[in-house]
Amino acid sequence: MVPISGGAVVLRVPIRRCALAERMIAQISQTEAGREVARKLTITASTFAQAENPPDAEQERVRIEAELIRVAFGPDLEAIHPGECTIQRCQESCTPSYKLLLGHFGCEEAARQETGRGCLGAGEPER
């Protein structure tokens, strides 16, 4: 909530981090198609300035890993913020979406390893 004269406005910005979404971005960024999607789902501290020579795939992968990745959307492509980031959403929506998206981008092994146990502290954190 941001107080303003005459009332308050609810800002819907990604103020919570989502480890699952961040792992998803790191995994799908291993392919060119995945990097294209990752760029649309993240808010980063900096971007490459317009240059005569665009970065190659390896430079782009390193940039995504090196920058502070702030994912704007969970794996279910809904906003990341406290009011909606619940254990139920994580287990019923985000985890299945994570597995589906990773499978789509060829990361089947990482998708198989995800159990949803780490959702907002539900059970033991995954390793």
Image: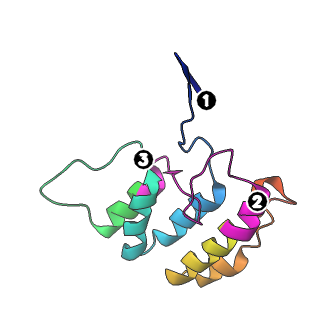
| Secondary element at image label 2 | helix
Q: Position of residue 42 (x, y in %)?
A: 45, 54
Residue 44 is tagged as 3
Q: Which residue is mark 2?
A: 119
Q: Amino acid at mark 2?
A: Cys
Amino acid type at mark 3: Thr
**Could you say where residue 123 lies in the image, as x and y percent from the top left?**
87, 60
Contact between marks 2 and 3 (CB within 8 A): the answer is no
Q: Position of residue 64 (x, y in %)?
A: 43, 57
| Nearer to me, 89 or 62 | 89
User: In this rendering, does residue 71 appear at all?
Assistant: yes
Left or right: residue 72 versus residue 116 is left
In the image, which residues are magenta?
A: 64-93
Disc 2 and disc 3: Cα gap in Å? 24 Å
Q: Is residue 111 left or right of residue 56?
A: right
91 left or right of 100 in image: right
Q: Which residue is mark 1?
A: 1
